[in-house]
Structure formats: C-alpha cells, structure tokens
Amino acid sequence: MRVLLLKDPRDGESGPDPYIKELESRGHKATLIPVLSFKFISANTLSDKLLQPEKHGGLIFTSPRAVEAVKLCLEDKDRKQEWNKSLKDKWNRKSIYVVGKATAALVQSLGLEPEGEDTGTADVLSRLIIEREEKNIPPLFFPCGSIKREVLPTALRENGVPLETLTVYQTTEHPDLEKNLKNYFTKQGIPGSVGFFSPSGVKDGPGSGTHDVH
C-alpha cells in the first residue's frame, strides 16, 4: 500500500524517518511531504527571559520548535558560555515541564532536566502542573508558537497558577507544499492512506480546499 505522510522530517536524526522505516519494514511504500514551515521571532525578548531565571517559577515546552528557538538564542558565544556556566543550573533548580519524548530529548540537550514527558498532551500536563505548583510562585515561562492551543494557559489561569507566554515562532504553509503534492499525485496517483501529524497539517493538507497561510 502507498502511504502519504504529511509531516516534517524528524529533527536531529540521520537516515530514513522512523515512520517511513517502520512502514517499509511491513511492505508499504511511504512518502513524506513537509506541510509546515516555521519562522522564529522574538529572539531578543526570549534571550532576555532566559537570562533572568530568578524572575520565573520554571519553564514549559510543549513543542520541539520552542526548544529550537531557545537553541538559536544560545548560538551567541557569550550567551552560550553564560548558559553553561550558571544559567542552566539556575533553571534546573526550578520546574522544567515538557510534553512528549521528542521535546524532552531536545530539552535535555540544553542541559536541562525536564519532567512530564509521559503526559502526552497539554491537558494532562496542565493537571500535573496544577498538582505540583503553588499559586504564589513567580510566573512559569511558556515559549510557544503563534497557533498554540489554549488548553494549558486556560487551565493554569483558571486554577491560579501564574503563567507568562511568549510567541517565539510562527507556523505557515510550507512554500513547496502545493508543488510537492501535485508531483506526488501525478507520479503515484491516489495513496491508499494519508497520515496527518498536526491540526495545522490538516488545515494545510490535501482535502482542505485551499492552502491558507496560518
């Protein structure tokens, strides 16, 4: 069976995407087409926040892209040196929350010690945070995307847990999406199965009628 995967390649991994590898091991022909593109923003504000752990109760990461934004801020030699010398240890004295193993692995690569990787969703993570955090802490810092779901911020707000959000990346349609889809359908026809990997991918993927930029 031909399978079309509408997702980004897994960051930091060499060789075939694990989904393609698994499908091909079971006799399927899988093709991956990236659906989304990401633009990082607010770098100066993000850098300022990272340099002031004393003003926050901890960090929350719910996507790999938010961690990538932090990594970009730390590419500066002096900033990276300060991070390794003292800042990461100061953050590690606070709570570092994540959703998912992929995001957790990237956070660990920063030298941070995350918790919550097995929560799976922002809804479950929000319940974990509410159980563990006091209402009188400094705000938890949540770098996020432009089209984040409001589940976690709403749950924390309704339960009195302070939160400060900062949009650090924007999600848009991949510039080659329409061309790649046309090439795929022309050469391979209609696939037996299509896999979507995010709500944004569903909006931008085949069957949406239009390819709106989000």
Image (spheres, grey):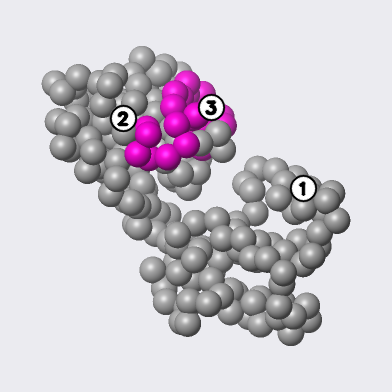
Which residue lies under the disc numbered 1?
22
Q: Earlier in the sequence, mark 2 or mark 1?
A: 1
Residue 79 seen in the current view: no
SS at badge 3: helix
Q: Magenta region: which residues?
A: 103-125
Name which residue lies at 77% across and 67% down: 2
SS of the residue at dot 1?
helix
Q: Amino acid at mark 3?
A: Gln
Residue type (three-letter) at the residue carrying disc 1: Glu
**Label 3 Cα neighbours within 10 Å, binned few <14 / some 14-19 / many ≥20:** few
When the figure is inspected, residue 26 is found, relative to residue 104, above or below; the finding is below
Pinpoint residue 186: horizontal percent, then vertical percent.
74, 84
Secondary element at tag 2:
helix
| Residue 163 image-quadrant placement | top left
Q: Position of residue 27 (x, y in %)?
A: 85, 56
- The answer to whether any part of residue 102 appears in the image is yes
Q: Earlier in the sequence, mark 3 or mark 2?
A: 3
Asked if the stretch drawn in magenta spans residue 122, the answer is yes
Point out the image quarter for the N terminus: bottom right
As drawn, the label of residue 127 is 2
